Image (tube, rainbow, N blue to C red):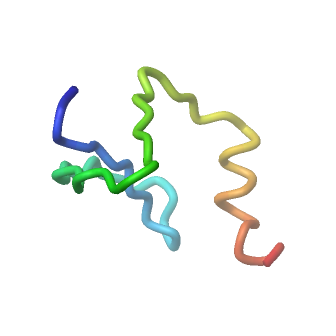
Amino acid sequence: MTTLNLTLQVNRARHSESRLVEQELPALGAAQVRFRVERFAVTANTVTYATTGDLLG
């Protein structure tokens, strides 16, 4: 398994601005697991939460 993680960071003030950040994964501790995500999707629901998430609390 790879030791690098890709994180999608989105500017909360400007949702059209985003970047991929590569980070090294930390070592796992006792009784911890790591999952690999092969695919993800940005949906209308995701965009709604990005727009109103801070208002909802």
Please say if 14 is above or below 18.
below
Quarter of the image for residue 49 reads bottom right
Instruction: Single out the residue that lies furthest toward the front.
Output: 30
Q: Which sits in the foreground, 39 or 18?
A: 39
How far across and how far down the image is residue 4, in percent? 18, 42
Instruction: Single out the residue that lies furthest toward the right.
Output: 56
Figure quadrant of the C terminus: bottom right
Quarter of the image for residue 10 reads bottom left
* Residue visible at 19% across and 53% down in the picture: 23
How far across and how far down the image is residue 12, in percent? 51, 69
Instruction: Single out the residue that lies furthest toward the top.
Output: 38
* Residue visible at 44% across and 33% down in the picture: 35
Q: Which sits in the foreground, 23 or 14?
A: 23
Figure quadrant of the N terminus: top left
- In the picture, measured across the screen, residue 13 lies left or right of residue 26, that is right
Please say if 32 is above or below 56.
above
How far across and how far down the image is residue 31, in percent? 45, 49
* Residue visible at 40% across and 29% down in the picture: 36
Please say if 13 is above or below 50.
below
- In the picture, measured across the screen, residue 57 lies left or right of residue 30, that is right
